Amino acid sequence: MKPIWIVDDDQSIRFVLDKALAREQLPARLFADPGEVLRALDAGATPQVLVSDIRMPGGGGLALLAELKRRLPALPVIVMTAYGDLDSAVASFQGGAFEYLSKPFDVTKAVELIRRALDESLRALPAEPGDGAPAELLGRSPAMQGLFRAIGRLSPSSVTVLVTGESGTGKELVARALHRHSPRAGGPFVAINTAAIPRDLLESELFGHERGAFTGAQALRRGRFEQAAGGTLFLDEIGDMPLELQTRLLRVLSDGLYHRVGGHQPLEADARVIAATHQDLEQRVREGSFREDLYHRLNVIRLRLPPLRERREDIALLARLFLERSARALGVETRRLDAAALARLLAFDFPGNVRQLENLCHWLTVMAPAQVVRAADLPPELQGVAAVAPAAAAPMPQKAAAVGAEAGWLAALGRELGARLEAGEPELWRRLGAQFEAQLIRSALAATQGRRIEAAHKLGIGRNTITRKIQELGLDDDKP
C-alpha cells in the first residue's frame, strides 16, 4: 500500500496525524507545503490518500486539489479547514474533495475518515468490457450471464426472438445486441413501439401506404418492414397490438409477403423480427386478446430479461457506471456511494428496474450535497428502505410495532399534505422539506444535549452535513 500524505504548514498537526496513523499501522509521509507535494509527484511518487490543509503559505489547498485531480483523478483527497470556513468547504467539494475535516478535529474521527478514504482508494474496480456494450447489459449475476450465453448462441442465426421482461429492464438493448451479433448486422435496425402509435395509424407505420390510399395520404410511404429490409425489425410492446393487425402480422411471418395499405403489389418481408413485451402473453391468449397462432409464431426463441431485484449483484456496478456517465454529462466530479447508501440501494426493489436506477444516479449527481453520497442523501423513496439485517437482530413484535408506527406518521403526513395541496399552498416541496429536516435535527440535538457530532451519528449523516444544515435552516438561533 502507498503511504498517506499529510500536507500542513502546522508542524503539530502533522505530528498528531502521523502518530495516530502509526498506531493504526498506516504508513504516512509528511509535507509542509504544496510545493513539496508537487515535487514528490514530479519525482514519480504517489499517495494512496492525501490529507491537506486548505490555507498554507506557498500555495493553497484548493489549488493543490485542482492539480491533484488533474494528475490523479481517482485519488481521494481530504481537505482540512477552519471550523467557520464554510465557503472553503463548499469550494473543496466542488473541486472534487472526498471529504473535509473541520479544525480543531477529533483525532479518532480523523483516522476513521482517512480509513474510509483508504477503503475507497483500495477498492479494486473491475475491468469493464471494451466492446462498447451498453452499461445496462453489463452484469456478473447468474441471470445476466445466462442471457449473454443465449445471445452468443443465437449470434449465427436470424431466427425470430421474443424478449420478455418488466418495463425498464432493457429489452430494446437485448434486441440491438441480437442484431449487432447476427448475420444481418450490416443492415438497418428499425424499432417501433406498437403501444405508442394510434391503432388507425399503426398499419400504415408497419406496412406503408400508397398515394391516395386514404385521406391525407398524398405520397407513397415506406413502412417499417420495408425500411428494415436486410436488417432487423424490433416490435416493442407487441402485447398491445390490436387484434386486426395481429392477423396481418401473422400472415407476414407465415408467408413472408405483405401489401402496403391501398396497394396490390406484394412485397417481400426481408427483415428479422424481434418482438418484446412486459405482459404475460399466455394470459393474454387465454383472455382472447392475443392470437394463439401469432404467439407461437413469435415464441420461437424466448429470452427473459430479469428485473433488477433478481440481479442485485449488478446494482453496485451499474450505479458506479451511471454515476460516472452523469458526471461526464454534467461536467462535475463523479459521486461515490458510501457503504450505508449502497446497502439501501441493494435492499430496494427498483420497480422501474435499470431505468429507475439510472434516473436515481442522475438525481444524485445533481442533488447530493457532497461527493460521497450517504444514506441520508438518497431521495425520499429510498429513505424508508433498510439494509438487510440478521433475522435475530430484532424480535418480530418490536419490528411490527416499528412498521406500524412508521405507517401511522406517514399517513398523518399524507393527510396534512393533502389538506395543504387542496388549499393551494405554494412551494410545498421546499417548505415542508425544510421543516422536516429542521425537526429531525432539533430532535437529535435534544436527545444528545446539543452535541452535534453525536446527533449527526444518530441521524446517520456526517458532521459537516449537520453543520451545513444547521446554518442553512437557521437553527443556530434556536434557544436551548
Image (cartoon, helix red, strand yellow):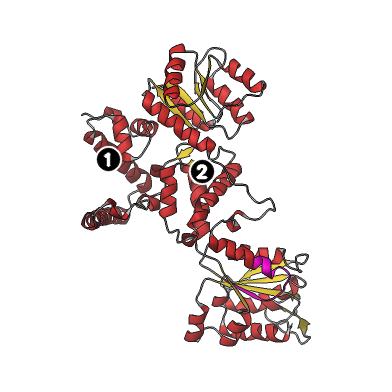
Q: Which corner quadrant holds the N terminus?
A: top right
Residue visible at 24% across and 33% down?
448
Q: Is residue 17 left or right of residue 95?
A: left
Cα distance in 3D space between marks 2 and 1: 26 Å
Depth check: 249 or 99 in front? 99
Label 2 packing within 10 angstroms: few (<14), some (14-19), many (20+): many
Q: Amino acid at mark 2?
A: Thr
Q: Which corner quadrant holds the C terminus?
A: top left
Residue 158: say if magenta: yes
Measured as percent of width and height from the top left, residue 342 is found at 45, 47
Q: Is residue 472 above or below residue 210?
A: above
Measured as percent of width and height from the top left, residue 232 is found at 71, 70
Residue 439 circle label: 1
- Nearer the N terminus, badge 2 or badge 1? 2
Depth check: 118 or 136 in front? 118
Q: Is residue 52 left or right of residue 66?
A: left
Residue 365 circle label: 2
Mark 1 element type: helix
Task: Please give the range of residues in magenta.
Answer: 151-163
Measured as percent of width and height from the top left, residue 312 is found at 48, 56
Q: Is residue 429 above or below residue 88?
A: below
Q: Amino acid at mark 1?
A: Gln
Looking at the image, do the residues carrying marks 2 and 1 touch, with CB atoms under 8 Å apart? no
Depth check: 456 or 14 in front? 14
Mark 2 element type: helix
Task: Evaluate whether residue 169 shows in this view.
Answer: no
Task: Evaluate whether residue 388 shows in this view.
Answer: yes
Q: Quadrant of residue 453?
A: top left
Residue 318 circle label: none
Q: Is residue 61 above or below residue 11?
A: below
Residue visible at 48% across and 33% down?
117
